[in-house]
Image: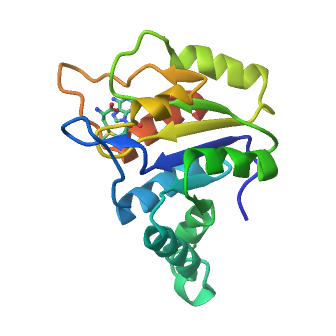
Amino acid sequence: MPGKSRIWCALVHYPVLDREGNVVTTSVTNMDVHDMSRACKTYGVGSLVVTTPIDIHREMVEKVAAHWQDPFIWKRTPSRRHALELVRVVESIEAASALMEREGGGRPDIIGTTAKRCRRAISYETLKKQIIADPQKPRLLVFGTGWGLAPQAMDMCGCILEPVEGAGEYCHLSVRSAAAIILDRLLGKK
Ligand code: SAM
């Protein structure tokens, strides 16, 4: 069963951008689901909601997550089972928010992530302070795929986190790496 934390993550496959800036649906990547669920479990996130409008992709993710709940499969690697049990699958960001409203403590604040600088971005310090001040408030951290969340997805976000910046100009993290860094900044002990 998903954890009780009031912070959930969503991995979004629509609406996202492609390299030309078109709004598209991306394919689900198995590695994203495995790695992000492990990061979510490590940092105490309640659920990782994978969103895709493609029925067969939802079925595939559900099968992968269910596979790891089989004792015959997980007995040698129980850590994988505990991570993948956080995975939920729905068709859209709206559905992820509705799921959290029903099962995650209430209607969440939707918090966007992006590699791009954005005028209304808030810092990790600010959000971390808000989380510490009000840990019971439901919050849904939204991560994009492809070339990032499309404008209509960003518009659904009550706030956007500043980008994770590296040592220089190059800033092309995978969603898995970005999610792990962001969760550490918001929920890590240090
Ligand atoms: N240029 C895209 C963008 O605007 O975010 C990069 C897309 S990246 C492959 C997919 C997702 O990973 C983004 O939607 C975001 O959730 C996350 N991400 C990647 N790099 C990030 C960064 N430097 N800071 C914050 N999030 C990042």
The image quarter containing residue 149 is top left
Residue sitting at x 60%, y 85%: 70
Q: Is residue 181 above or below residue 117?
A: below
Residue 113 visible in the current orientation: no
Quadrant where the image shows the N terminus: bottom right
Residue sitting at x 62%, y 22%: 128
x and y percentages locating residue 62 in the rendered image? 55, 72
The image quarter containing residue 33 is bottom left
Residue 56 relative to residue 135: left or right:
left
Quadrant where the image shows the C terminus: top right
x and y percentages locating residue 46 in the rendered image? 68, 49
Residue 178 visible in the current orientation: yes
**Which coloring applies here?**
rainbow
- Ligand 1 is in which quadrant of the figure? top left
Residue 34 relative to residue 65: left or right:
left
x and y percentages locating residue 113 in the rendered image? 45, 30
Q: Is residue 74 above or below residue 91?
A: below
Residue sitting at x 81%, y 33%: 136
Residue sitting at x 71%, y 47%: 98
| Residue in front for this viewpoint, 89 or 44 | 89
